[in-house]
Image (cartoon, helix red, strand yellow):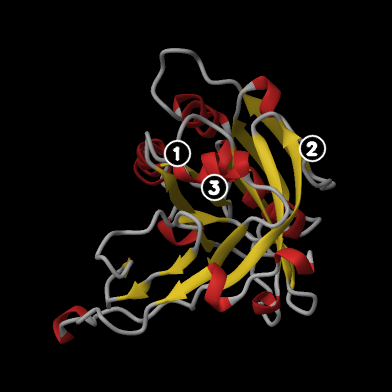
Amino acid sequence: MDAGRALTPAASRTRHTGGMAVPEELRIRRPPPPFRVAEVVEVADRSPHLRRLVLAGPELVGFAEPEPAASIRWLPARGDALEIPEWNGNEFLYADGSRPPIRTLTPLEVDGTAGRLAVEVVLHGAGPLSDWARRAAPGTPVAVSGPGRGYVPDPEAPHLLLAGDETAIPAIGQVLAAAAPTTRVDVAIEARPDAVVTLPDHPQASVRWHEPVPGEREGEALVRAVAAVPLEPGSRAWVAGEAAAVQRVRRLLFEERGLPRSVATVRGYWKHGRRGT
């Protein structure tokens, strides 16, 4: 970390511990992990659409080692300062009552001893996360909270379906790397041709990339790809992507193909018009 740009409580962030009266009836949810302040120390592009950022800082020391495909909350600076919102029992709010632009990302290469972790952000149209990722440079402040629960592949499963869109690429890579070498893995990803990246090697993995068709609904290519993957007794599934698309995947897997809900994880990562990796 560049000591000349190190964060200081007085100059770089504001924590509000008072001034927000929270009715007792709103305190109905367990508080999430607190935000930890860090800064960007490295930026690199995996593809024209996927930017990798390494974050570091003393507050990341002790960050828990996450499961594959876990999640963290991402919070950018607000103007010139990194203002940490307060938890009111249901959500995070700034002192003025407004909602912060929190998004969810997959933590990569977490080193709790060195106080470092990496994230990968899909660059798309305008939006708080991708706009921030385009501007981010060494020294850019940020805060993260987590990690949330991830997905540990069943080592006894004979078959695993991994599917998602571009926002799921980081998590798919982690789950693929964690899958037992005896598990046959079908990977299906909806992505633009120039968004294809190298995934971890697996001795029994079949990786197929599916290009979206102009004019179709978001995720339609993903739904078709999932429908084409043969399932067998004991199959497991992990799927993530645009919320409406994964709803169609849920119906396909559970209602049409009879996959037990207990052996599948299907997550909506973003809604059309609002992305998050």
Relative to the observer, which residue lies in front, 271 or 247? 271
Which three-letter amino acid code belongs to the residue tagged 3? Thr
Relative to the observer, which residue lies in front, 204 or 94? 94
Mark 1 — residue?
Answer: 127
Which three-letter amino acid code belongs to the residue tagged 2? Thr
Secondary structure beneath dot 2 equals: loop
In the rendered image, residue 79, in percent from the top left (x then y), is placed at 46, 54
Residue in the image at 67% along x and 75% along y: 60
- Give the foreground label among 1 and 2: 1
Mark 2 — residue?
Answer: 198
Q: Is residue 207 visible?
A: yes
Residue in the image at 61% along x and 41% along y: 135
Mark 3 — residue?
Answer: 277
Estimate how packed mark 2 is, as few (under 14), some (14 to 19) or many (20 or more) residues with alpha carbons within 10 Å: few
Which three-letter amino acid code belongs to the residue tagged 1? Gly
Mark 1 or mark 2, earlier in chain: 1
> 208 left or right of 214?
right
Question: Gap in Å between the C-alphas at discs 2 and 3?
Answer: 17 Å
Relative to the observer, which residue lies in front, 198 or 205? 198
Question: Gap in Å between the C-alphas at discs 3 and 1?
Answer: 12 Å
In the rendered image, residue 122, in percent from the top left (x then y), is placed at 59, 39
Mark 3 or mark 1, earlier in chain: 1
Question: Residue 101 sits in which quadrant?
Answer: bottom left
Mark 2 or mark 3, earlier in chain: 2
